[in-house]
Image (cartoon, rainbow, N blue to C red):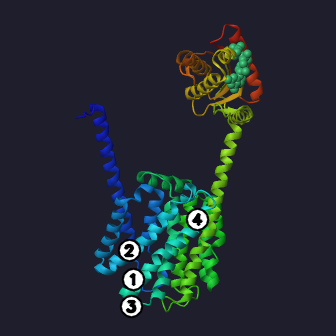
Amino acid sequence: MPTTPPSSSAAATSGSSLGAAVLRKDVALVFSAVFLAALLGILTRPSAYLAAFWPANAVLLGLMVREARLARAHGWISAIAGYLAADFLTGGKPLPTLALTAANLCGVVAGVWLYARVVPGSRRLQRPLAILHLYCVTVVVALAAGLPGGLASAHFFGSSFSSGFVLWVSAEWVNALLVLPVVISAPTLPWRRWAAVARAELRQLEWERAAPLLALLAAQAAGMWVGGPGGVAFPVAALLWCALTYTVFTTALISFVSCTVQFAGAAAGFFDVPLEPVHAHSLVSIRLGIALLSLGPLAVAVSNASRAEALARLDRAVSHDHLTGVLARGAFLSHAGRLLNRLAGEGQGVAVLMLDVDHFKLVNDRHGHASGDAVLAGFAALATSALRPEDLVGRLGGEEFAAVLPRTSLDDAMHVADRLRARVAEEGFEVARGGTLHVTVSIGLVRVDDAAGMSIETLLARADEALYRAKAQGRNAVVRAVV
Ligand SMILES: Nc1nc2c(ncn2[C@@H]2O[C@H](COP(=O)(O)OP(=O)(O)OP(=O)(O)O)[C@@H](O)[C@H]2O)c(=O)[nH]1
């Protein structure tokens, strides 16, 4: 009989308890999200179709698109339980409830299946093409739910199949277009952090950042005041401004709220749309029109975010040394120059270090270039970790590095430099061939009371003279320049 070593059995137990915990969390999440969203839909169910709001399907689809793990048996069963619980709690009859739940699920299943086939960036609205995918997926979701929904409406509620179908398809499409982007673009944060992030955002809210939101309120009010069908499009310019200012998630949230207000405005008669009969062609048309208008700002927000991300990546690639990850020479000099300007007049002192790995040529010659590279990368990582986040580290070329330590006394600068020298000598660096290589570093240091009138080039030249003396003294040393 095979025996399991104690350590593996402990690992298996903790693994299975982790699995059970995740499962419980998934079930609670899906059930409560579907139940609450369905309850909200039922409780706000209007007499006039125009204000119909059924977020449950889009919320469920969004959750399953975000986390593929949820689209398994436990997720589907929790979702069905959520739909049924909300309906039965509000007096739904068994057969119609089952039929409507089946129709709801048909749309979600179609959406999950389609989204599993698009690239991950599209699933979280991280690339411009994602809006086209969102459009196509939501059309199919609406049709997949509308077909059984229309049949159920005809069978249980006595409406014609065609009017039931049109109502279902348009309501599904509108809800998916507005709710799905909010769910799939929401940042992944623990519940506790949401309140902290919202508080921090509100504290930092300046006029400049609040202006697009205020413009949206004004445009929305103007649209209702002027009236007529064109009034629904009045907020578009302000929504585009929001898209250029805020994140994709915030834009999706603002579009959702703005469109909901427009629906309410239409239902209240501001846009001169006839409200009867409830499935009138003009009502369906204006509803879809309002929802489709939200795609423009969303596309702008997504393009803007992916452009900003590409620029940030490009900037990082240009300004950072690809081997060591610290600032490359040009970026280091310009960052350091700007830092000295900021420090000028403060009178708190600044130190500049020149660091050079000793006999580095021998490392390459004896252990190969790849090992030399590993030593340089390890050294840069060690230097970065030994300094403070506000210190600046750069690679000037070859095995030569530099650092700027703002607001540092001479004693502190000497102490930091010597501690780094000692750590390099002690720790050694792992190389690709296997094993650890030990090297030493020589450091030249200059420290001035005030950076006013000092250029980074001048300070580096002084530190370089001190470095030269450290090498001449036998290396593995820190030498200070006399100023
Ligand atoms: N592996 C590797 N070697 C580099 C890189 N850049 C420069 N080198 C090598 O670094 C070595 C620098 O050697 P030297 O300038 O003679 O200095 P050293 O051997 O460190 O001697 P001292 O500075 O006097 O202690 C040269 O052999 C360069 O080829 C790099 O990116 N990777």
Q: Which quarter of the figure has residue 314?
A: top right
Task: Say the numbered circle drawn on residue 152.
Answer: 1
Of the residues under marks 2 and 4, which one precedes in the sequence? 2
Task: Say the numbered circle drawn on residue 46.
Answer: none
Tell which of 448 and 144 is nearer to you.
Answer: 144
State the image coordinates of residue 473 (x, y, percent, origin top left): 68, 7
What residue do we see at 60% from left, 67% from top? 214
Q: Distance between the residues labelled 3 and 2?
A: 18 Å
Query: According to the image, label 3 marks what residue?
Result: 158
Helix or strand or loop: what does disc 2 sit on? Answer: helix
Mark 4 surroundings: few (<14), some (14-19) or many (≥20) residues within 10 A:
some
Query: According to the image, label 4 marks what residue?
Result: 133
Q: Does the residue labelled 1 lie within 8 Å of ligand 1?
A: no
Left or right of 42? Residue 117 is right
Res 314 visible:
yes
Query: According to the image, label 2 marks what residue?
Result: 102
Q: How far apart are marks 1 and 4 (CA)?
A: 29 Å
Q: Do the residues labelled 2 and 4 touch (CB within 8 Å)?
A: no
Tell which of 5 and 145 is nearer to you.
Answer: 5
Of the residues under marks 3 and 2, which one precedes in the sequence? 2
Helix or strand or loop: what does disc 4 sit on? Answer: helix
Quadrant assignment for the N terminus: top left
Mark 2 surroundings: few (<14), some (14-19) or many (≥20) residues within 10 A:
some
